[in-house]
Image (cartoon, rainbow, N blue to C red):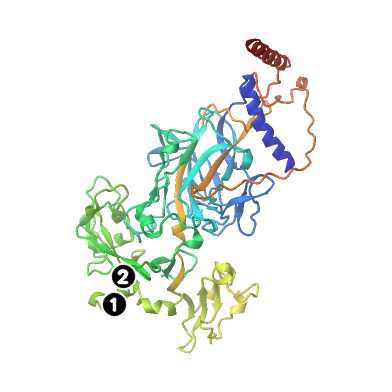
Amino acid sequence: MSTKRKYARNRLASAVFCSMVGLPYAAVAATVDSVNTDNLADPPVEGKTLVYTDTAGTETFGWFDPINDSGDPGLGISVYNEVFSAAGFDFQGCIMAQTDLQPDPNCLAPGDSGKRFKLKTTETNGPIDLVFDVTADSDSKLYRVIGKFSNLTAALNAAGGDLKAFRFETGFGVGNDFVSSSAGDGLSFGIDGGNKISAGDLGKFPGGLFGGSRVEGLPFFSVSVADFVEGSSTDGNEDAIETDGVIATEYSDLFGDWRALSQVPTGWFIDHDGNPANDSILLAWDAGDTGVVAESGWQTYQKVFEAGDVSVDYDGDETTDPLLIPIANWDPNSGSFAAAVTAEDGVTQITDYVENVRPLVETLGEGDEDPANDAISLVRSAAADLYVADYAGTGAGFKVLIDGEAVEIAPFADWADSPVTILDSEVGVTQPVFATWDPEALDGEGAYVAGDQDGQAYTGTAYDFSVADSNGDTFLTLDEIDAADPSIFAGTLDRQAGYVQGAVEDLANVNINTSINVGADPSWPTCTSDGTSTNCTFTLRVTGLNDAVEVPTIPVTPVEPEPEEPAAAPSEGGGTIFGCTAGKPGAPFDPVLPGLVLMALGGLWARKRLSNA
């Protein structure tokens, strides 16, 4: 540890020295190979890949979720050198979650596949330094950065922990040793025609809440995107991106600034498939006391499907005319829901088109300034007014479109008595509930408890809760269910849909997109060469911002005794002195040069003395 810290400082000092004496620092082109773990908790600490402010683990302002969406542990972030195209740009790789998909390229993993790394900030204005290892190469390379940035600040400061913006910076070193990248040094954000490449919105609240998403479905709060845009302070700066400090009105009109997770409102969700391992669907949120009776308490938005048609290329053949399908056919409460339409071949009848909401999403506010053309609109109301036993005289409850199905929602008053459960279908009416999901169990991780929510024990004899409860803590986690004998769900035990109350977590999360360019002729202060190969590191610094909050002090790294490192004699060819090169990388430093430099400095001193005389 101590040797690494000394080495990092020397590399930065070397860059300064080389620039003073007019010598180039070791210059190479670059390929981003991997995430550098010197300032990461590897293995994770208490389930978190902590990002430290130094390699000694002195302090941290943020962490990665190390578990990917498949449940596999890792760092939570990885580099993939895969050539691909996205949003009209050609990339040579990406920085994203640690998915390791095979055989499909990770960088082109489909939406909602968990490809975004999950970075959490725990300190307002606290920089999080992500370091990457780089090796020499011959070409300039562009990497897409695909992540999710979450506000987990403590919400104890004067601003309530809310954020207003975020900043990306490229540079070298971490914490107090961080040095910003400079123009022309070979490291920058990707630039196209003066604009920074983001392959999508630079930042936005998830599409399942605002604006919609072809993978996250139709929006809940607004048909328009709640996005972040770059401000003027970094416009034209190739090494920094800072958003303009304005939270989109779609979000701010309801919640103010970017809320911390501990401050987001509570929501009611439906777990439509009875599987807590995947996402539940938001049905309503607790607006609290707004001062207006009609807008207080549990609120929701009804999706109103507009009149007209949408164009659908069902067969993927551009030479055939697309289908024009009535928007009402996606409305789960209409008589034409999923009505059969004739395919482009003029013969085949299809109904599964409703599983794809992309045609509707593409009409919404992602740059569309004409709301009259939106396929849906949203009407706010009290949850108890929309979710009733007999919606609009249909004899059924209000239905929600989920995965192409019209899912009937129970009356609002019944949700609290309808949790997610596992039932034994062979047990009579006495007590068939084998287990009930408790989302607050195990410090909010969630787990099943035996029997029903009132503590009534399961009366069947075919299954024993304690058999699956491997650690005997009286809770049954999703991991324990996965590890249990598969026959536990192959018999008469069935997962039952239900209603879950919890934080609307995505109100604390922002999807981020940017890009990093490693140039064909970099001159970086964190490169070293042995005359044969050159290795470098660079830092991507990410910071959640609020100008109303004091900037935290980065603690000084504890001083530890450092071992002496004998210097190789120049005649031995043991590398460069000070990291400078006067020829090829790694060539020994000419011993005459220091003398010439000192003579030059002496001459300048003498001239200054004479001019001052």
* Residue closest to the eye, 84 or 173: 173
Q: Amino acid at mark 1?
A: Ala
In the depicted structure, whether residue 340 falls above or below residue 24: below
The residue pinned by badge 2 equals 294
Q: Is residue 105 visible?
A: no
Circle 2: residue type: Ala
Residue 429 occupies quadrant: bottom left
The part of the image, by quadrant, that contains residue 560 is top right
Q: Earlier in the sequence, mark 2 or mark 1?
A: 2
Residue at (71, 37) in percent of width and height: 6
Relative side of 523 to 223, left or right: right
Residue holding disc 1: 396
Residue 400 x, y percent position in the rendering: 33, 68
Circle 2 crowding by C-alpha within 10 Å: few under 14, some 14–19, many from 20: few
Question: Where residue 83 sits: x, y (%)?
Answer: 47, 39
- Quadrant of the frame with the N terminus: top right
Q: Give the class, few, some or many, for how many residues have Cα within 10 Å of label 1's Cα (few <14, many ≥20).
A: some
